[in-house]
Image (cartoon, grey):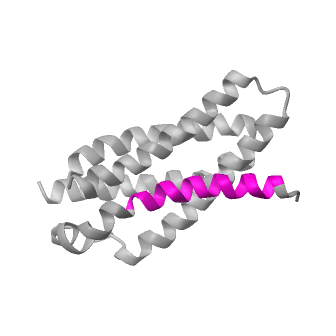
Amino acid sequence: MKMHYILKLLVAIGICQFVGNSGLLFTMSAIPTWYATLQKPWFNPPNWIFGPVWVVLYTLMGISLYLVWDKGLKHHGIKKAIYIFDLQIFLAQLVMNALWTFLFFGLHSPLYAFVEIIFLWIAIAVTIFRFYKVSKAAAWMLVPYLLWVTFASVLNYYVLILNA
């Protein structure tokens, strides 16, 4: 693999990991205080599981972004406007991901976070659909992310209901 490909891969993963780490500003202070006081459903995983899961998911997201970024720039059959739209959808879902963390942990609002996570789920599904046209592997790498956000949506809903 040529050095510029490795650099692009590292940049793509780095962007995703940066967004993920930006949420630590809100979660680190809220978990031992506000979050610890919330009623949670019986199926809520232990707190330590979320960090490793997100590191893996952000890495997969970065690899997925790299695959589309690389293939889109080389493949003449992919129109530039469509390619740019695909990357914008990806970046929009990435921003929504960070926004959920701010709403839930920063504002302490399970309600706003739940409304937002529905839009996040839709954006991820659209990203998968769009990426599938460019790179099947890139699309499949986002499926665990969609599944985890589905699970997070259910958790968010139950936290909302149990603490209303």
Magenta stretch holds residue 42: no
Seen in the picture, residue 46 relative to 91 is either above or below; the reply is below
Residue furthest out toward the left: 164
Measuring from the top left, give residue 26's x and y in whole percent.
30, 61
- Residue at 19% over, 72% down: 33
Q: Which residues are magenta?
A: 4-23
- Residue at 22% over, 59% down: 159
Q: Main secondary structure of the magenta part?
A: helix
Measuring from the top left, give residue 49's x and y in whole percent.
43, 74
* Quarter holding residue 118: top left
Q: Nearer the viewer, residue 28 or 63?
A: 28
Q: Nearer the viewer, residue 35 or 44?
A: 35
Q: Is residue 41 visible to the viewer in this orientation of the structure? A: no
Seen in the picture, residue 78 relative to 59 is either above or below; the reply is above
* Quarter holding residue 24: bottom left
Q: Viewed as shown, does residue 36 lie left or right of 124? A: left
Seen in the picture, residue 45 relative to 123 is either above or below; the reply is below
* Quarter holding residue 41: bottom left
Measuring from the top left, give residue 27's x and y in whole percent.
32, 64
Quarter holding the C terminus? bottom left
Q: Is residue 80 visible to the viewer in this orientation of the structure? A: yes
Magenta stretch holds residue 8: yes
- Residue at 24% over, 66% down: 30
Quarter holding the N terminus? bottom right
- Residue at 69% over, 30% down: 83
Measuring from the top left, give residue 58's x and y in whole percent.
56, 58
How many marks do you count on the picture?
A: 0
Seen in the picture, residue 132 relative to 16 is either above or below; the reply is above
